[in-house]
Image (cartoon, grey):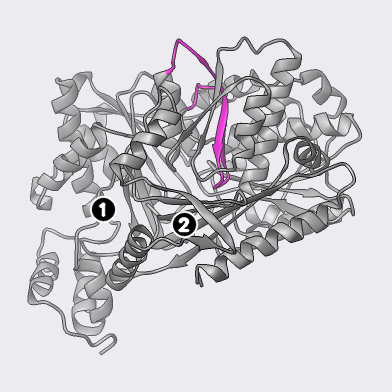
């Protein structure tokens, strides 16, 4: 027997419940197979219930209480429906909108969600085909819905899927709704409590009409349309990585005025198996290999690739030696914020009432740029929902210019309340055109920024720890950093530690952050005398613990950029060795 291990009898009893007629035949057969042949997979599938977290569900697809399937999705939706009715009252006055990406089972999970909502008397809009996550955020506000759901696991590997919940402001759920929804979902103990029989009269399909309104709004963000007219033949290589970007990203680029969009044909077809990549994650170099090959073939000016639900974008540019290099999320965010602030300033659009937002693990270079333009920069916890919450907080009082996070997610304007790769691709293309008009590349713009504000170098590394044992290992690592922090890192004295679970530390952070309060979180940041910053946090969506490193150095006109980068890279490598992070 595969994975022959000792399993608690309660888990066996729990699994055997899935052999009853309440479950479909395919599910029953798969559970029977696990019971007889694969106890390790049986344990992972049933040892706990898939947790409905502060953003919704995310997990490996399969049978069992700890897997994404129509039953766990149905139970989550029933709990959410109960909460919506408690919060808003009469279900006939409640409307939700549902979108889904190209992952396997996404359409099935979306239709299951629509059926459960409508069975509870709630009105449902559902997209007629795959759509980007940010379009879902836009549509909630546009159609004045009370809630939105998108079925996606973003950039996770192909075996994953997810269920993300948005509130009426278009942002992902935060306190108090997140905890309240979790409590309602926990109350659903059995699929007997779920009404799966949908009411077709309450379900309405939407599509192209929303696409047009959404992309028309994006077009209004353009700051230099005249330059785009001159550079309309800019060669842009784009890949949707088998995801939702194939229609909306290209449509938005065309509306901006770009006419020379070169697609990576083998990656254009939406496919939940993501056959041409190991992982559909534009943060990983391998994901853009085919796009880079195409760029070399056609002599492109810019390469962009979006993840399956089109909320993240990876960017590649030529350096001064004509070699293609990949920008990391901090670099792209810095270029984007610099462009937005410099051009708004040039056009006298900065009135002193504007702000930008970034996460605490995103480069502090952005904050330096904001200071230079006398624009407020707010720091928030990791997760775009916190950026959206700041936008909501200041709505009608201050103007949001843009924001982003190091994990390749950015936003311009406030009509979407989540990271948006459709917007980002159009704006990055515009910045490339603006640079080319000055006989520069995006890389040149980045170097100009470094020379003005200092060279910041960041690196993210993570340790994967799967299963029950992995969760315990991650807890132990965080315990050690929390209770036995280093006093010296790479020969530099530790001058400050912020533990976002510590009330004294969080009070200090909130005082520095002004009107925006940061909630408690399982994050530790270590600051050293030489300006290095190390941030440690367990991932909220994957079985990983993440380490973020940031170092910096002044850069003069005469400095060799490569030598300075290598020096900073050595510093990061030495920090990793010193902290024994493998």
Which one is closest to the eye, mark 2 or mark 1? 2
Q: Residues within 10 Å of mark 1 (few under 14, many from 20)?
A: many
Q: Picture coordinates of residue 264 (x, y %)?
A: 71, 52
Kindly state the secondary structure of the residue where label 1 is placed.
helix
182 in magenta: no
Residue 156 tag number: 2
In-image side of 245 versus 484 (left or right) = right
In-image side of 580 versus 58 (left or right) = right
Seen in the picture, residue 534 relative to 439 is either above or below; the reply is below
Q: Picture coordinates of residue 520 (x, y %)?
A: 31, 41
Q: Picture coordinates of residue 298 (x, y %)?
A: 86, 51
Between 71 and 21, which is closer to the camera in this rendering?
71
In-image side of 10 versus 308 (left or right) = left
Between 368 and 180, which is closer to the camera in this rendering?
368
The residue shown at (60%, 21%) is 375
Q: Picture coordinates of residue 285 (x, y %)?
A: 65, 60
Q: Residues within 10 Å of mark 2 (few under 14, many from 20)?
A: many
Residue farthest to the bottom?
Answer: 1
The N terminus, quarter of image:
bottom left
Residue 171 shows up from this direction: no
Q: Which residues are magenta?
A: 394-416
In-image side of 320 versus 380 (left or right) = right
**Could you say which quadrant of the image residue 205 lies in?**
top left
Residue 272 shows up from this direction: yes
Between discs 2 and 1, the one toward the N terminus: 1
The residue shown at (70%, 57%) is 568
The residue shown at (8%, 76%) is 9
Q: Which residue is mark 1?
A: 70
Do the CB atoms of the residues marked 2 and 1 lie less than 8 Å apart?
no
């Amino acid at each position: 027997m595969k994975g022959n291990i000792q399993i608690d009898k309660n888990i066996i009893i729990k699994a055997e419940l899935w052999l009853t007629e309440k479950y479909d035949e395919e599910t029953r057969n798969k559970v029977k197979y696990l019971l007889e042949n694969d106890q390790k997979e049986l344990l992972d599938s049933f040892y706990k219930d898939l947790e409905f977290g502060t953003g919704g569900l995310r997990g490996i697809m399969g049978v069992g209480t700890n897997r994404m399937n129509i039953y766990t999705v149905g139970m989550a939706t029933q709990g959410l429906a109960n909460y919506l009715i408690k919060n808003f009252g009469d279900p006939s006055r409640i409307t939700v909108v549902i979108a889904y990406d190209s992952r396997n089972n996404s359409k099935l999970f979306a239709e299951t969600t629509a059926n459960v909502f409508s069975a509870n008397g709630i009105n449902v809009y559902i997209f007629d085909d795959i759509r980007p996550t940010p379009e879902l955020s836009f549509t909630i506000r546009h159609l004045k819905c009370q809630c939105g759901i998108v079925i996606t696991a973003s950039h996770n590997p192909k075996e994953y899927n997810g269920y993300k919940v948005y509130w009426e402001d278009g942002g992902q759920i935060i306190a108090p709704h997140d905890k309240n929804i979790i409590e309602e979902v926990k109350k659903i103990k059995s699929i007997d409590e779920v009404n799966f029989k949908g009411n077709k009269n309450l379900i309405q399909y939407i599509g192209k009409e929303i696409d047009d309104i959404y992309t028309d709004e994006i077009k209004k963000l353009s700051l230099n349309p005249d330059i785009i007219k001159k550079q309309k033949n800019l060669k842009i290589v784009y890949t949707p990585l088998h995801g939702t970007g194939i229609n909306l990203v290209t449509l938005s680029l065309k509306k901006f005025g770009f006419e020379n969009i070169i697609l990576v044909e083998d990656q254009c077809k939406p496919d939940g198996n993501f056959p041409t990549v190991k992982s559909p994650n534009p943060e990983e170099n391998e994901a853009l290999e085919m796009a880079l090959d195409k760029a070399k073939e056609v002599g492109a000016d810019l390469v962009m690739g979006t993840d399956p639900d089109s909320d993240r974008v990876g960017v590649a540019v030529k350096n001064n030696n004509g070699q293609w290099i990949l920008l990391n999320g901090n670099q792209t965010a810095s270029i984007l914020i610099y462009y937005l602030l410099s051009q708004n300033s040039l056009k006298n659009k900065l009135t002193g009432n504007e702000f930008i937002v970034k996460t605490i693990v995103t480069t502090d270079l952005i904050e330096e740029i904001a200071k230079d333009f006398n624009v407020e920069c707010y720091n928030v916890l990791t997760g775009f929902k916190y950026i959206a919450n700041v936008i909501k907080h200041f709505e009608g009082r201050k103007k949001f210019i843009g924001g982003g996070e190091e994990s390749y997610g950015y936003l311009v304007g406030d009509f979407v309340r989540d990271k948006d790769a459709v917007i980002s691709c159009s704006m990055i293309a515009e910045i490339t055109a603006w640079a080319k008009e000055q006989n520069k590349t995006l890389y040149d713009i980045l170097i100009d920024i470094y020379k003005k504000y200092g060279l910041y170098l960041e690196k993210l590394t993570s340790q994967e720890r799967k299963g029950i044992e992995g969760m315990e290992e991650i807890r132990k690592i965080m315990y050690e950093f929390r209770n036995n922090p280093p006093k010296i890192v790479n020969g530099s004295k530790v001058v400050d530690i912020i533990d976002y679970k510590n009330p004294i530390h969080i009070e200090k952070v909130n005082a520095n952050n002004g009107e925006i309060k940061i909630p408690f979180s399982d994050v530790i940041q270590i600051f050293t005398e030489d300006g290095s910053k190390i941030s440690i946090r367990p991932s909220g969506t994957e079985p990983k613990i993440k380490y973020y490193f940031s170092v910096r150095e002044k850069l003069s006109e005469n400095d060799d950029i490569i030598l300075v980068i290598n020096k900073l890279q050595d510093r990061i490598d030495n920090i990793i060795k010193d902290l024994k992070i493998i």
